[in-house]
Amino acid sequence: MNVNSLLEQLAPLVKEYEDKKKKRMDTGFNVFYLISDYYYRETFHGDILYALLSPEEKHGQSRLFVDLFIDMINRVKRLVDKSDYTMASVEREYGTNDGNDMGRIDFLIIGKNNHCIVVENKLNNAGDTYRQLPKYRKDLMNKGYIIDAFVYIPLDQYKEPDKADWAEEEINSIIPKLIIIPAYGIGVVNLIDNWLTLAENITTNDDARFIIKQYKTLLNNLTLDIMDNRELVDVLLSNEHFETTVTIFENRDAICKKVKDGFIESLKKYWEVKQENDRITILIDNDWQYVIQLYKANWKYYRHVEYIGKKQLPNEIDPIWRRFPYFPFGEDYIEEDKGWCYWENPDTLRAMHNGTLLTFIVDEINTVRKRIDNL
């Protein structure tokens, strides 16, 4: 195991990767980042895609977006006759049953004479369910549908459907009709360049244009890390360095623990600190304590202030707290834009290791002390 050799080879790649991360598209005032708890979920992306694809939705553009979507499909493979979809409808979460297992097609675009297009949304990078596309194919064929295309939409341009559990006849039937259209990709037809941008430029609905523009920004940033770390991953998984990489990976828990322990020791330079499982308590004074904890329900990083004194608090204390929404009274996770949401999130580990999180907490507790003293 040659750790030094691996680190020497990784150093320039890591620098390049970090430089590219700094050049992420500026999100500005982006509505999707304001609801950032949700955009990692498949249903979130499904809601956006359906709102655009369905001619019945409130964008008021009739078949414009679904027509552009079909044009995008035909740029990859000319599989769809648009004349079959002049009265297209879009079904969301279309239920299937191949006789063995239930399933739901993310979107089923239905045209005339039972023509249809199967659309599978993988923009949250989820894996395939068991025999996903073959299951959909069997059910639709049993119902008399003519499947013109299977459209697979991943975040990563190199992600493909899992064909390990497909029969040879299914492979021969599905693959010729399979189209992979990633959110973004270099040198390939992709959702951003070949659908969303066209839709943004053509739509006459200002609200739709605004939503599409903001959604494009989100997708651009979500795909950046996947694209930029590929060379880094190739070095880590090369034959020369594979065993070293696996050994480091095996010690991930120990690395995280050491960073967290060092962070807690840095806190002790300022206050009396107690650690109990995933809860760190900082004693501000004899009446108040500041608590940092990992909330088990969703693994988020929370902090709040608890009163532990014996004297009766004044009646006005509750409305006073409410005048200061920034003050972390009650469960209030550290802001998403600071990236400190999970104990073992890379951004959290960086913030603990480089002192950024310590500075944040010192400043916040000083603010807390002033507000408590003013009471």
Image (cartoon, rainbow, N blue to C red):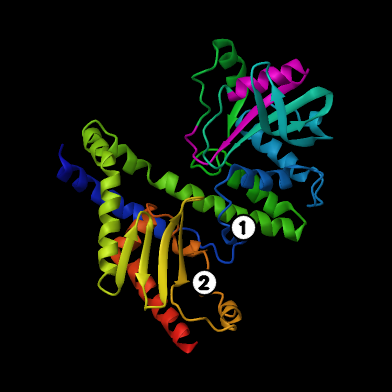
Q: Is residue 38 magenta?
A: no
Q: Is residue 60 left or right of residue 168?
A: right
Q: What element does badge 2 sit on?
A: loop
Q: Quadrant of residue 18?
A: bottom left
Q: Is residue 113 above or below residue 267?
A: above
Q: Amino acid at mark 2?
A: Phe
| Residue 3 x %, y % | 17, 43
Q: Quadrant of residue 145?
A: top right
Q: Amino acid at mark 1?
A: Gln
| Residue 202 x %, y % | 73, 52
Q: Is residue 294 above or below residue 233?
A: below
Q: Which residue is mark 1?
A: 214
Report the residue at 20% width, 47% height from top.
7
Q: Is residue 206 left or right of residue 272?
A: right
Q: Is residue 336 above or below residue 107?
A: below
Q: Is residue 160 above or below residue 138?
A: below
Report the residue at 63% width, 47% height from top.
44
Residue 34 seen in the figure: yes
Magenta residues (range): 132-159
Q: Which residue is mark 2?
A: 329
**Dot 2 or dot 1, earlier in sequence:** 1
Q: Quadrant of residue 121?
A: top right
Q: Is residue 199 left or right of residue 122?
A: right
Report the residue at 55% width, 12% height from top.
167
The quadrant of the image that shows the N terminus is top left
Report the Cα–Cα distance between label 2 and label 1. 33 Å
| Residue 250 x %, y % | 27, 38
Q: What element does badge 1 sit on?
A: helix
